[in-house]
Image (cartoon, helix red, strand yellow):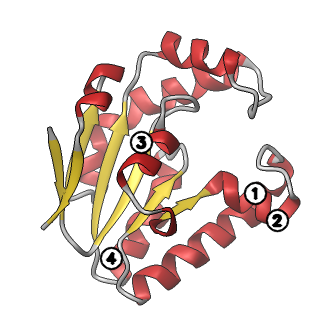
Amino acid sequence: MKIKIPKFSLVVMIGVSSAGKSSFAKKHFKKTEIVSSDECRAIISDDENDQTVTKDAFALLHYIIAKRLKNQRLTIVDATSVQTESRKSLINLARKYNYVAIAIVLDIPEQMCQDRHKVRQDRNFEDYVISKQYQDLKRSIKYLKSEGFRKVHILRSAETVDAITGIVRV
């Protein structure tokens, strides 16, 4: 199965930690197309887990996205984006630069994300964080189109994620 996206798209990966957003993005997009909140944290503080720099990291993330859109580059946002408020600024950037906002949602079962998180060496937060993110995702997922996403692709299982064979730019 392939996902079609317009050439001038801002693709927002949405899902809880350990859902597989970064892996999906790395598999289907160029490294230069992906703007990651974790990498922005690392740029600011040398530690992608340092939550104390989140405000600065997201300022950097939005700056990079704006520069890419201004220069007419397909841009993929790799962040949890499970809350409406976190997506609003991304939708506004897409609109400002006449880009189409596309959501790719990895709605992976919470227990699978919890299990994946337990074996990750690069993350160090408590299980309740994933539970909270999962609640936020479930609460807001049905409103994505009304928020301004032109197309919403919801992948509800690891098998569905793995079945995506490519991204077609139209």
Q: Amino acid at mark 1?
A: Arg
Upstream in the sequence, badge 3 or badge 4? Answer: 3
Mark 4–mark 1 CB contact (< 8 Å): no
Label 4 – label 1 distance at C-alpha: 26 Å
Relative placement, left or right, of 47 versus 133 is right
Is any part of residue 122 visible from this angle?
yes
Task: Look at the numbered disc 4 and give the secondary structure of its residue.
Answer: helix
Q: Position of residue 52 (x, y in %)?
A: 86, 51
**Foreground disc of the pair 3, 1:** 3
Q: Position of residue 149 (x, y in %)?
A: 27, 57
Query: Which corner quadrant of the image does residue 126 belong to?
Result: top right
The reply to whether the C-beta atoms of the residues labelled 2 and 1 are less than 8 Å apart is yes
User: Are discs 3 and 2 less than 8 Å apart at CB?
Assistant: no
Residue at 64% across / 21% down in the picture? 117
Question: Residue at the spot x=86%, y=57% of the render?
Answer: 46
- Which quarter shows the C terminus? bottom left
Amino acid on which disc 4 is placed: Arg
Image location of residue 103, percent across then percent down: 31, 50
Label ID, residue 138: none
> Which residue is denoted by mark 1 in the rendering?
41
Q: Reading the chain from its start, which is encountered first: label 3 or label 1?
A: 3
Dot 4 or dot 2: first in sequence order is 2
Q: Please report whichever mark, 3 or 2, sits nearer to the chain's N-terminal start.
A: 3
Which label was assigned to residue 95? Answer: 4
| Callout in the foreground (4, 1) | 1
Q: Nearer the viewer, mark 3 or mark 2?
A: 3
Check residue 44 in the rendering and tell me which mark sits there, or answer none: 2
Nearer to the camera, 25 or 132? 25
Q: CA distance from mark 3 to mark 2?
A: 24 Å
Q: CA distance from mark 3 to mark 4?
A: 25 Å
Mark 1 is surrounded, within 10 Å at the Cα level, by few (under 14), some (14 to 19) or many (20 or more) other residues, namely many
Q: Nearer the viewer, residue 95 or 146?
A: 95
